[in-house]
Amino acid sequence: MSTRMLDRLGPSRALLVGVGTLVALLLLALLAPRVSQALLVVFASVLFAVFLDGLAGLLRRYLDLGQLPALIIVLTGISGLLAILVVLAGPAIGEQLAQLGERLPEAVAKLRETLHSMPWTGTFLRNAPEASELVPDPGQILGEVTGVFSTTLGAVVNVAIILVTGIYLAVDPKIYRRGLVLLFPAQAQERVQQVVGALGHALRWWLVGRFATMLVVAVLTAVGLWIIDMPLVLALALTAGLLAFIPVVGPIVAAAPALLLALMDEPIKALNVVIVYSAVQFLEGNFITPLIQKRTVALAPAVLLVAQLMMGVLFGFMGVLLATPLTVTALVLIQMLYVQDLLGNPVRVMGQNGSSG
């Protein structure tokens, strides 16, 4: 509100406006953490809807189907694949994950004992504070890991919200796009429609690239660990595949359990583990990812690392998990609304290197 308008309101009303603005800003500051956490859940729902809509669109391209029948086939196929996976590999994976959970604390304890026995590390560790003083309470750690889920109704409820909301959004995405476009002035609606379409296109192709990378990393890790005769191959490969969803940071975290188990078994095996994970990352970074990114979305590693660091500090594990798709969204908006519209500079929008669809 300008100074001239405040003068017309008079001193009393101007004071009320000022106080009201201050109160609104304070309320926004107080609600910001909860609102941001809720927005992360909403964004995860949209991301899931984009994934489902992409698969449904692929079916519609080759079959004469409407959106709802195609979506039903997609959901049925996903459910069937998960059921087959659970029946065939579920017991083995579950048993290995349980063993992994039991053996990791033993591996950490053995590593600490080994380091204590070394002269140059033992002195440092004896003078260092205990792990209990440095590591938060397990309940606090769990709260950080679950992030947004632990602050609302719990992980199960929030996952259910993401799944159900994502399915509803994917049933008829055009309704929600039209509703969003109508929030803008008539002269801007065509451009908003283009931006929304570009965002969906970029996120869809980013998901394609991520899931392809996750599958390849899981298979290569399983083969490599099997060759060096590592225990719990299925659990470790599944962990590596899932954490590959988080670029840069995920592969480093995934290697830690395997390295600890190898150290507990025999030190030479730890060297083999390092070689396997390094080889997988070399193949992924130099051959697999460039091949996939010819048709998907590519992001510079430095950009990803900064985004993950910032999102992790602000929102915990959920922020790290969604940092990359949020970065894709932000970059598309910057390219289209700032570089193209405001500056008038030509730029290829992220995702345009992927095939249209």
Image: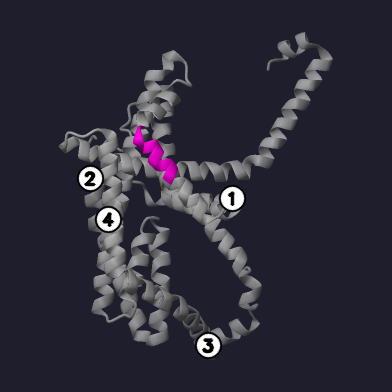
Amino acid type at circle 4 is Gly
Q: Quadrant of the N terminus?
A: top right
Residue ID for mark 3: 113
Q: Is residue 224 left or right of residue 116?
A: left
Amino acid type at circle 3 is Glu
Measured in 3D between alpha carbons, the distance from the residue under mark 4 to the one under mark 1, in whole angstroms, is: 31 Å
Q: Nearer the viewer, residue 116 or 67?
A: 67
Instruction: Please state the extent of the stretch shown in magenta in the rendering.
Output: 164-172
Amino acid type at circle 2 is Lys
Q: Nearer the viewer, residue 297 or 222?
A: 222
Please tell me whether mark 4 or mark 1 is closer to you in this view.
Answer: 4
Residue ID for mark 2: 294
Question: 333 above or below 15?
Answer: below
Question: 268 above or below 345?
Answer: below
Measured in 3D between alpha carbons, the distance from the residue under mark 2 to the one under mark 4, in whole angstroms, is: 31 Å
Q: Residues within 10 Å of mark 1 (few under 14, many from 20)?
A: few
Please tell me whether mark 2 or mark 1 is closer to you in this view.
Answer: 1
Q: Is residue 72 left or right of residue 19?
A: left
Please tell me whether mark 4 or mark 3 is closer to you in this view.
Answer: 4
Image point 27% across, 59% down: which residue? Answer: 215
Which disc, if any, is residue 152?
Answer: 1
- Residue at disc 4, secondary structure: helix
Examine the structure image and report whether residue 228 is included in the region drawn in magenta.
Answer: no
Q: Nearer the viewer, residue 93 or 312?
A: 93
Spot occupied by residue 203 in the image (x, y as percentages of width and height): 35, 41
- Residue at disc 1, secondary structure: loop
- Mark nearer the N terminus (2 vs 4): 4
Please tell me whether mark 1 or mark 3 is closer to you in this view.
Answer: 1
